């Protein structure tokens, strides 16, 4: 009787074990693999991904890169994201890194509402004397590119940031911004407005790109603004004109002395 019980128990254990191994084997027979597993791209580049049996493709951040229903990835802006691939039962990912081709100056600190002391503690560039108590300026020379940066405050809180470059860098600056921001508007004077998201509800920063004269010189000007402070009806730069001119004079003085 004991032998029969032991034999029956052995048979049951064997059946369960075989079933488990069979399931595991079936599960591993068709793994979902995406190739390549990671890609590095530039703005507007495309790359085809492959994954046998995939039924859906999804980008975790379409501002950085989007993906078609067939796995074609298009680079939109500098940054990192993941492409999530699924076959209905399993998911896998491909890491996408979009790198810039144009680097003209170090990224400014865009912590809207931050205090002047906070910005000063985070800035690593040489601070320059200022004629305004609401503006702090820095020497942002980047390689061979002379550059200056000004931070403007209202009621002690960061409101706008201006970068100023030589006029000869105007065209490259356009490409620099296209790699990083989404075009939103263009004026008859060839001024451009960019934003940092694909929809208004996600925008935090607006970027105004133009040229301005100061004395005998003409400069390429990039003005970063708190998107939430722009006109709610037009999202234009109205109201920033006087602020811009004040910063322009301050920052231009830096370039002229370089």
Image (spheres, rainbow, N blue to C red):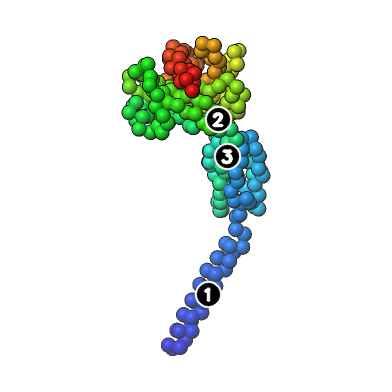
Q: Quadrant of residue 46?
A: top right
- What residue did someone put label 2 on? 144
**Residue 225 shows up from this direction:** no
Q: Nearer the viewer, mark 2 or mark 3?
A: 2
**Residue 74: x and y, percent?**
63, 38
Of badges 1 and 2, nearer the viewer stands: 2
Give the numbered dot on residue 15.
1
Q: Is residue 148 visible?
A: yes
Mark 2–mark 3 distance (CA, rounded to whole Å):
25 Å
Front one among 38 and 23: 38
Residue at the extreme front: 257
Q: What residue appears at the point 58 percent right and 62 percent down from the top-left corner? A: 28
Calculate the distance from the C-alpha at mark 3 to the C-alpha at mark 1: 52 Å
Q: Secondary structure at mark 2?
A: loop
Q: Write down the quadrant of residue 2 in the picture.
A: bottom left
Give x and y (percent) for residue 229: 42, 20
Vertical relation: 94 (above or below) 11 = above
Picture residue at 47% right of the left edge, 20% below the top: 257
Q: Which residue is mark 3?
A: 98
Relative to 35, does residue 238 appear above or below in the rendering?
above
């Amino acid at each position: 009787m004991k032998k029969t019980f032991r034999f029956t128990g052995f048979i049951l254990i064997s059946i369960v074990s075989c079933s488990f191994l069979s399931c595991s084997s079936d599960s591993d027979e068709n793994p979902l693999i995406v190739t390549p597993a990671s890609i590095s791209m530039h703005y507007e580049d495309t790359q085809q991904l492959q994954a046998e049996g995939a039924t859906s493709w999804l980008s975790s951040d379409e501002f950085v890169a989007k993906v078609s229903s067939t796995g074609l990835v298009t680079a939109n802006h500098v940054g990192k994201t993941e492409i999530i691939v699924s076959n209905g039962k399993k998911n896998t990912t491909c890491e996408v890194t979009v790198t810039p081709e144009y680097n003209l100056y170090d990224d400014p600190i865009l912590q809207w509402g931050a205090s002047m002391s906070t910005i000063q503690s985070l800035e690593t560039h040489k601070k320059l004397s200022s004629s305004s108590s609401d503006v702090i300026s820095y020497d942002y020379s980047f390689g061979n590119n002379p550059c200056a940066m000004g931070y403007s405050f209202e009621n002690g809180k960061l409101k706008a940031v201006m970068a100023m470059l030589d006029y000869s860098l105007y065209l490259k600056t356009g490409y620099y911004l296209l790699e990083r921001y989404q075009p939103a508007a263009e004026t008859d004077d060839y001024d451009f407005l960019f934003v940092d998201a694909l929809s208004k509800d996600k925008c935090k920063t607006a970027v105004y790109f133009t040229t301005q004269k100061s004395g005998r010189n003409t400069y390429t000007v990039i003005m970063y603004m708190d998107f939430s402070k722009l006109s709610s009806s037009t999202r234009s730069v109205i109201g920033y004109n006087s602020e811009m001119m004040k910063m322009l004079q301050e920052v231009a003085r830096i370039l002229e002395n370089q």
